[in-house]
Image: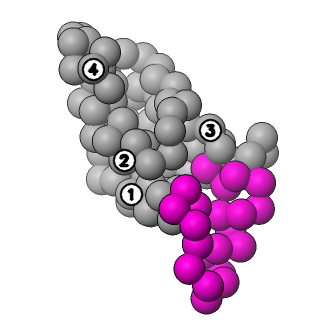
Amino acid sequence: MKLLSGLDGEFDLVFVDAKKDEWEAYLESVVPLLRPGGVLVVDNLLWGVQVPLAAVNEESPDKEVASLLAFNERFVNRPQLQSVILPFADGTGFAVKAE
């Protein structure tokens, strides 16, 4: 996270692969760094089938799955992003920053 605070400028592509419980902080940090039309890619959003199962299961998920559920909700509903989560390679999120 320290590295992100020192970056300046706009980026065409950002790939996030970090500790699950820090992803929301990464989202908040990287969206302002993306240029309009820039792409954000995030991996492991479905974590196999653990995240989809937790979404429909009434049991409380473990800490990492709960973090992913919360992140996915913010990722797909963030107004500045047009986002989708695709079910390949443990779930890959793609987003384009709105113009």
Report x, y in % for residue 30: 33, 30
Q: Label 2, label 3: how many angstroms apart (C-alpha)?
A: 13 Å
Report x, y in % for residue 21: 44, 48
Closer to the chain start, of discs 2 and 4, is 4
Q: Residue 24: which numbered mark, if any?
A: 2
Residue type pointed to by label 2 = Glu
Q: Label 1, label 2: how many angstroms apart (C-alpha)?
A: 8 Å
The answer to whether marks 2 and 4 mark residues whose Cβ atoms lie closer than 8 Å is no
**Residue plotted at (36% across, 36% down):** 26
Q: Circle 3 is placed at which residue position?
A: 43
Q: Residue 2: which numbered mark, if any?
A: 4
Find numbered disc 1 in the image and state the secondary structure of the residue it sits on. Answer: helix
Q: Circle 1 is placed at which residue position?
A: 74
Report x, y in % for residue 45: 61, 50
Residue type pointed to by label 1 = Arg
Find numbered disc 3 in the image and state the secondary structure of the residue it sits on. Answer: strand
Q: Label 3, label 4: how many angstroms apart (C-alpha)?
A: 21 Å
Seen from this angle, which residue lies furthest front? 62
Asked if residue 5 lies left or right of residue 84, the reply is: left
Closer to viewer: mark 4 or mark 1:
4
In this picture, which residue range is highlighted in magenta?
A: 45-65
